[in-house]
Amino acid sequence: MTRGVIFDYGGTLDTGGLHWSEVLWAGYRDARVPVSKEQFLECYVYAERELARHPYIKPRHTFLDLLRLKLELETACLAARCYWQAREESRKAAAEWIALFCYARARQGIEASRPVLETLANRYPLALVSNFYGNLRSVLRDFGLELFHSVIESAVVGARKPDPRIFRLGVEALGYEAQETVAVGDSLGNDIEPASRAGCLTVWLKGKGWQDGQQVSALPTWTITDIGQLPVLLL
């Protein structure tokens, strides 16, 4: 019997299963930035590691603030590695274009998820368990998505997916047994496997992930291809 639901955030609630690298890459193409996808991915990984190492992101920052910081790191990396020959003002203008493009995409994704979350929140307490930067509550406030009983954020609690401890914290926050809790996420490796190891039932939102065809030892309890399928499954 399901008594509580844990959601992943990025890639699950804001993009419908599409990994954020793909959303950003779509923004680069929309801005006509003349780099290859391999060059972009190299600097995408660099920026992610920099954001994890240094406290660029503050608790007050919205998702648009986060995107601007991320795009500054990525585009500066592309210029520093000579992948993109552009004047600084042109680079900054392109970074702003991409940030606004991605922010609009995130808002669209959130609006698609909102009715699902509102429906489930009428029946179950909801928790978020996310690898994030310490500003997730500000992001939720900006999007008007304050439907969660608890927000468990890697930068705050000191545990990061795929460590199953972060899902155990989500289970504890909801106050039920793990086997009474359903975890929903878009990543087999970062969501489904650790949530299963924590004892949760799992729903995999199958989309275009970071590593398609990733091999894991735990299979999801259920698989969906659209967040809108979730109420039918859980209610």
Image (tube, rainbow, N blue to C red):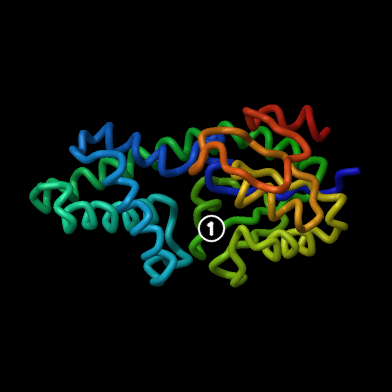
In the rendered image, residue 223, in percent from the top left (x then y), is placed at 70, 33
Q: In the image, is residue 163 above or below residue 29?
A: below
Q: In the image, is residue 36 above or below residue 168?
A: above
Does 30 sit left or right of 93 as displayed?
A: right
Image point 53% across, 47% down: which residue? 10
Q: Quadrant of the N terminus?
A: top right
Does 46 sit left or right of 119 as displayed?
A: left
Which amino acid, by three-letter code, is at mark 1? Leu
Image point 66% across, 28% down: which residue? 228
In the rendered image, residue 74, in percent from the top left (x then y), is placed at 28, 53
In the rendered image, residue 28, in percent from the top left (x then y), is placed at 28, 38
Q: In the image, is residue 221 above or below residue 86?
A: above
Dot 1 surroundings within 10 Å: few (below 14), some, or many (20 or more)? many
Can you identify the residue that label 1 sits on? 136
Question: In terms of secondary structure, where does tag 1 sit?
Answer: helix
Q: Quadrant of the C terminus?
A: top right
Residue reaching furthest right? 1
Image point 39% across, 71% down: which residue? 54
In the rendered image, residue 188, in percent from the top left (x then y), is placed at 63, 44
